[in-house]
Image (cartoon, coloured by chain):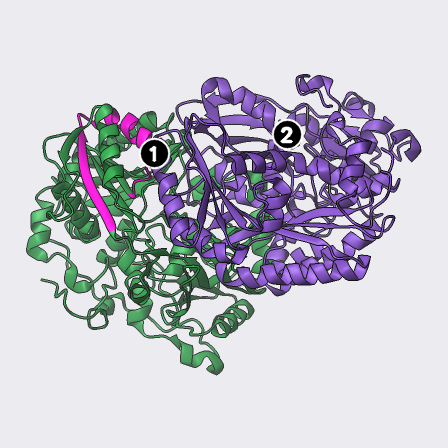
Chain colours: A purple, B green
Amino acid sequence: MPDQTLPRTLRTRSWWGWGWADAHPDDAECVALGALVPGTLARPLPVPRVADLRIGGPAVEAPSSLGHLVTYDPAPRAAHAMGKAFRDVARALRGRPGRIPDLVAHPVTDQDVADLLEWAGERQVAVIPYGGGSSVVGGVEYRGEAHRAVLSLDLSAMDQVLEIDTVGRAARIRAGILGPALEDRLRPHGLTLRHFPQSFEFSTLGGWLATRAGGHYATTRTHIDDFTQSLGVVTPAGTTTSWRLPASGAGPSPDRLFLGSEGALGVITEAWMRLQDRPDHKASASVSFTDFHAALPAVRALAQSDLAPANCRLLDSGEAALSGAATDGRAVLVLGFESSTAPVDDRLAQAVELARAHGGRTTSGPADPSAPADSAVGAWRSAFLRMPYLRDGLVRMGAVAETFETATTWDRLPALIDAVRTEVGAAAHRATGRPALVNCRLTHVYPDGAAPYFTVIAGGRPGDEVAVWDDLKAVAGDVLHRHRATITHHHAVGRDHRPQYDLQRPEPFARALRAAKHALDPCGVLNPGVLVDG
Amino acid sequence: MPDQTLPRTLRTRSWWGWGWADAHPDDAECVALGALVPGTLARPLPVPRVADLRIGGPAVEAPSSLGHLVTYDPAPRAAHAMGKAFRDVARALRGRPGRIPDLVAHPVTDQDVADLLEWAGERQVAVIPYGGGSSVVGGVEYRGEAHRAVLSLDLSAMDQVLEIDTVGRAARIRAGILGPALEDRLRPHGLTLRHFPQSFEFSTLGGWLATRAGGHYATTRTHIDDFTQSLGVVTPAGTTTSWRLPASGAGPSPDRLFLGSEGALGVITEAWMRLQDRPDHKASASVSFTDFHAALPAVRALAQSDLAPANCRLLDSGEAALSGAATDGRAVLVLGFESSTAPVDDRLAQAVELARAHGGRTTSGPADPSAPADSAVGAWRSAFLRMPYLRDGLVRMGAVAETFETATTWDRLPALIDAVRTEVGAAAHRATGRPALVNCRLTHVYPDGAAPYFTVIAGGRPGDEVAVWDDLKAVAGDVLHRHRATITHHHAVGRDHRPQYDLQRPEPFARALRAAKHALDPCGVLNPGVLVDG
């Protein structure tokens, strides 16, 4: 059992799988998980060892002036080779990881980053910015042959909260800080960023900014973009620091060019982030519906009201069963409100009433704040955080187990969801000879549309898991493209989503982006292949 | 007296001043206005006539294939020479307008725009995109000598609402539509864009998008950026159409590159805009404070609450007196709430209570919805819409009368406002030999800062009004720069704000923007001099 009381610094991160090594399912739990998926292995694949990778010496060495910042040790190099997508974990388990970087750097100052970029440009060394390493889209992995060597630029030593403005509720924060450390530093001031993606424990502010992460809030402002007051970015063409402004109409937003740039235009080293008072008032409830589609009008009505629930997540029956929120075959809408200003019970009551007026049935709550947490809500929250570990357990059993997500307008949503279920389901059946699980939930909802999140679990071709997934992912990408649904709502583009991203973005914009890339990264060393070609 | 019952099409726009020609103050009203400002003229300057400009023939003529789209008539050419800033009006009154465009085009289709851009690129003709012509920053005026001729690209014929999605509350709207026409088309569907800048009657959707206009809402989302679902932009490098998406994390936002691009990167021809249900529930009130600074903590508390007033405008005593909201020397906070979901009286009451807890004194309201409109609120609203006409009346009397605006964080706000009052006031005194009026209001407030809006009225150097204003504007720009306040919150950069904009934006971003400009507008004909040099 994982020892949750150990300080973070004494726990060990898994080099090949999600999160903490001691939190992974043990062999017995893996077997139990595998039993749920027909066609998986009888025994789990062994936990892989770095020593078995036989990592050779680096193709280049940094000059002595940078020597104190870099390491050539096999263990950190292996741990920085890939992100944490299903295909990354499966490749590690099968002893076929991505390209191992030649060196890993841990810069401390902006000047360190600038020096490393200058050296890399001179020597044609690819630079892969690395925050928490939780990318599920191939965002921190080198692919190709064009560069002489690969440097993983790990920002974890740049993890300070440098200034806090308690009057205007903002803080200047270095990019390499992980979610829990950030909230720990803000808590004594009564402040919070309230950005809690599923990867919260293992992802950094810089990663959230570089990938336009979506977080805690299910409605209104949830993307990290809206909480960004200003950015500091080190590019090969110089360091850019925008002014701290609550709003501005002075030309296209400088920050919006770097938000979502995924390390291809520069290295985000710090940001002034907009904070909030910690919410004293919370309330949650869940409402069930006969099925997922029957719940959509209720969810849309909530999204178009000004009630602004912090949580408004719709689970289909499979998702509800997986998370323990419901086992009666009904879809479940998990609602939550929070405020630092005033009690939210009235808003919750109005929301529940609206959901009931659209055919919902109250399954729990409005919760009494003094009572134990609402059971469906609590079950959902625990499952949410445990999910990536369970995925890795399934992967050890030779299963395909992965998620993908998108967003589209309300008018296109029902047909899109049906098409994903049908076409990805059929592709999985073709590929594995067995039916697969394709679950759906809405993670974020907007007045004009919603973000569906799909989970696929399939067994039947252990040994070919990666090829099966790549097939399914191509089918999924094609469905999204045909339905004009974005290739990503909050997971980012990375390398895995490049084909559909290239189809999605307008060509004149792509031309402008390539020009911007060339202006800022003339040697083409920054995260090559991400967003635009070198 | 203006005949407000006349349909728009039968009223005449002023070629030299704000809005409708028949709504301008008459000579007697001008004299009355002038009497309020020491050092102005005894009689108003005459209304200028196009014929007196002696406009010559165009330097180029469009090919016959484009002939049906263009005009060389002096009247439209004069009307398209400048925007509606003080310095534009003053120059017209003094018979020294900006460069008169050689021709004015009225494209109907995207292909028309593309054809005009292609021809202009081949012939080195500068193209100035023109919506409602309400720019107050030199955004629609050619300056310089580098181009062979100047084409004003008037988008007013592209004014259709092409599609309405009532489920997802969005509409596909052509860029040339004016505010009132847009709301007229949406009203039968119960929908509204709710974007009401002061220029609403005389500005277009395309202009709002190109300048990142700020509008109706005093809190939360007010910039047009947030209401943009997708954009269609014709650039010399091709037409770009982004997908309709409620949200996306796929790379830097394509739309955010064109929002605020002020015609320098392409011509925005249409957009899918996010709409709202028309609010059935409204309530307003006003609260007064001993002075402006004493009110700031109350306004900040409101901005940091989740009450989200639609209106939260703080007027200093001079502004309150000018608008008739108060004449007792106190600062006035005008509060308004609106909702399509539920009554807002509770929210208003909470806001008023919060303001009172911070030292405010209720001057009116919470208004009974059945009672006549709150007097301070009503007075403020009428004055707001009448203000530009009164300004032009003052200009006819030889006064300097202009506004400028900015935004900054709460910690910097009090010192910034004091510095603007002191330094701009002193500069006006030096320039004119008399004290000037420098009023301030907060137009938009955010959790992390606010947008102050300044009005300057000075007399004393009739004949030199433009030079006096340019002096004051340079002083104001310098104060904003030293205090790290943006050169514009919602008026845009244009040509008047270029010096401070160049200092404000980070250099690597400027480099990327220049590269994007060159990629999209390789001949350098699009609104030359705006944002970046050609």
| Residue B332 position within the rendered picture, expressed as x and y whole percent measured from the top left | 19, 34
Q: Which residue is mark 2?
A: A201
Q: Are dots 1 and 2 in contact, CB under 8 Å?
A: no
| Residue A160 position within the rendered picture, expressed as x and y whole percent measured from the top left | 59, 22
Q: Which residue is mark 1?
A: B303
Q: Is residue B482 above or below residue A135?
A: above
Numbered range of the magenta stretch: B281-310
For image coordinates 66% across by 31% down, the residue present is: A202
Residue B133 appears anywhere in the view: yes
For image coordinates 62% across by 24% down, the residue present is: A159
In the current view of this chain or complex, which residue is farthest to the bottom? B64
Q: Give the chain letter at badge 1.
A: B
In this image, A24 relative to A507: left or right? right
Q: Label 1 crowding class (10 Å Cα cut-off): few <14, some 14-19, many 20+? A: many
> Label 2 sits on what residue type?
Glu
Image quadrant occupied by the N terminus of chain A: top right
A259 and A391: which is toward the camera = A391
Q: Which mark is residue A463?
A: none
| Residue A339 position within the rendered picture, expressed as x and y whole percent measured from the top left | 40, 32
Residue B35 occupies which quadrant of the picture?
top left
Where disc 2 sits, the SS reads: helix
Where disc 1 sits, the SS reads: helix
> Label 1 sits on what residue type?
Ala
